[in-house]
Image (tube, grey):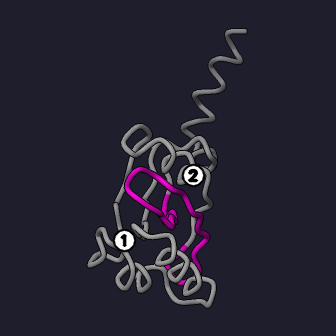
Amino acid sequence: MAPKAKSKPAAASDSSASKQKGAQSINVRHILCAKHAKKEEAAEKLRAGVKFDEVAREFSEDKARQGGALGWKTKGSLLPEFEKVAFELEVSSTGSPKWAEVKTSEGYHLVMVEGRK
């Protein structure tokens, strides 16, 4: 049993393993909308191929001037429902974002992840 326990921490520190869902921090962006209809408009723009940061500047009610960038966030530092979705997302770029939707007490979020470590 002891050798197995030793191999897990080594794998967790491996750079390829850190790109998996076991990451402890993510570089995250979001678009926050108080109203469902506004969130749907923003989602439609993303589906049409508009860059995530441009849509964030136009629609987000939080961090809009920064293209929705929240920066590096660790597990436990975000709202639980937001964090659950964000840590499951694949890493992508603002030009070709892989995003997801989540509702929190703050409103409706469109979330994307730019980095993971």
Determine the secondary structure under disc 2.
helix
Q: Which residues are magenta?
A: 93-115
In the image, is 10 to the left or to the right of 110?
Answer: right
Mark identifier at residue 83: none
Q: Nearer the viewer, residue 17 or 49?
A: 49
Around disc 2, counting alpha carbons within 10 Å, would you say few (fewer than 14), some (14 to 19), or many (20 or more)? some
Q: Is residue 62 above or below residue 5?
A: below
* Most common secondary structure along the magenta stretch: strand
The residue depicted at 29 percent of the width and 69 percent of the height is 63
Q: Is residue 18 magenta?
A: no
Residue 66, given in percent of the width and then of the height, sits at 29, 75
Name the kind of residue labelled 2 in the image. Val
Mark 1 lies on a secondary structure that is loop
Camera-nearest residue between 53 and 36: 36
Q: Is residue 112 magenta?
A: yes
Identify the residue under disc 1.
68
Depth check, front residue: 70 or 9:
70
Mark 1 residue type: Gly
Quadrant assignment for the N terminus: top right
The earlier-in-sequence mark between 1 and 2 is: 1
